[in-house]
Amino acid sequence: MENQYSLLYLSLLLSFSLLHEHIAYAAGTNDGSEHWGYVEVRPKAHMFWWLYRSPCRVEDPSKPWPTILWLQGGPGGSGVGFGNFLEIGPLDAKLNPRNSTWLRKADLLFVDNPVATGFSFVEDKTLVVKTDEEAAEDLTTLLKKLFNRNETLQKSPLYIFAESYGGKFAVTLGVSALKAIEAGTLRLQLGGVTLGDSWISPEEFVFSWGPLLKDLSRIDSNTLKISNSLAHKIRRQIAKGNYKKATASYGLLQNIISNNSNNVDFYNFLLDSKNDPVTGNRGSKGKDVMGKYSEYLSTKKYSPSGNEQDLPRLMNGPIRKKLKIIPKNVTWRLQSMLVFQAMRGDFMRPRIKEVDHLLAKGVNVTIYNGQVDLLCSTKGVEAWLKKLKWGGLKKFMSLDRIPLYCSGDNTTTKGFFRSYKNLYFYWILGAGHFVPVDQPCVSLEMVGNITRSPN
């Protein structure tokens, strides 16, 4: 088996060597289990990517081993840092192996998207994207330059997974990538698009916040009235295409709710914001199968508590040292305000039509949502779902849900599942905005089902 892996790793490295004329910088580990680099997606706009090859890979011609592309939210949040080290990557923020890493089911491709996020950078600030479509164009360029000359990647179906605002990137990328595939300019198997607690239709979410919190006794009737009034204002602004004004109103609504709920956590409405579920990393040491990823990182001078506030030290310290190719003038940050400010005009724009387009084209679309998420509440998701024009929606809505369990425990309900044709929905109980963190077991089983992983 080790010889088989060595040959596969060599094949991967040889395939990537063909890409060097298109990539500004590229590097990787000696055994080929990791590869990373920059793609110049536009002149002077550089996107950073990091590919992990799973040690759990199973070679089954009837079930090709999948690759997951992870898209973080924000916009301006770093997938290479946040999604990787705090959620699904091989190591947690303390650099311990994570037993629940999604590498158990697929290879993982993280990107810092859009450009100017995380380790990605622009040489001119005017090159920062302003819309989801522009971000999708850059991501499609990245995929072309990674996949088109790499037969190993072409044989691996790509599943686009997204979280939060990343869902808007995912559906616009799905539409853009599908168009390129149909035109023959992108050689890639699109396995599906998965939307985790995704900001697909902001209008539905802002309308859900007040009623949810009132029912939970977190706000009173006076605050509910103000919340509903602002939500109606946001609806009118969105209808008129005044997205920047809607973004400003969204910020005002968040502040009002925070001030009148004693700082409820928008990522978990059962908590205060200071007790955010990702604060204090929940990654476990796990089994030796993931231990090999830690040998490349020196931890002697790095002793984090494991929460998100330590990520900048981790990313600008041991990780930067490991990667070697990050320009000296690029500093990793949790959130790129440059990106967020540039995208204010698109932040509140809905992307329901893109979901409809993907469903109509036969692309598998999966939605999963945490039960106690407020920001992208399940109530809001179910509201925008009803706006789909997809022909199978009525049948989908009429079906009973199937209860989900985990690890052979059939006494504790972990969630519910429903599907019809190419639409799938997972309701994950006991989870907030960061589902893989709050419910790692059922999340991992879900990922295996979505990607049809042979493992």
Image (spheres, helix red, strand yellow):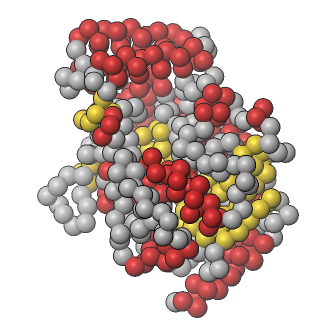
Decide if residue 254 is on the left or right side of residue 211.
right
Query: Residue placed at 56% from the left, 63% from the top?
Result: 318
* Residue at screen point 84% across, 45% down: 43
Q: Is residue 410 above or below residue 205?
A: below
User: What residue is at 62 percent from the left and 81 percent from the top?
Assistant: 31
* For residue 361, above or below residue 81: above
Name which quarter of the figure residue 381 lies in: top left
Q: Is residue 280 above or below residue 17?
A: above
Q: Please tell me whether residue 321 is drawn above or below residue 13 in the rendered image.
A: above
Q: Name the residue rendered at 40%, 79% in the picture.
A: 288
Which quarter of the image is occupied by the C terminus?
Answer: bottom left
Q: Position of residue 160 (x, y in %)?
A: 56, 51
* Residue 357 left/right relative to 210: right
Q: Position of residue 244 (x, y in %)?
A: 60, 17
Taking depth in this image into account, of 135 and 79 the one nearest to the observer is 79
Q: Residue furthest left?
A: 411
Q: How many marks?
A: 0
Residue 174 in percent (x, y) is at: 62, 45
State whether residue 239 appears in this view.
no
Say left or right for 47 vs 163: right
The residue furthest front is: 301
In the foreground, 150 or 51:
51
x, y percentage for residue 27? 71, 69
Whether residue 322 is visible here, answered yes or no, is yes
Residue 42 falls in image quadrant: top right
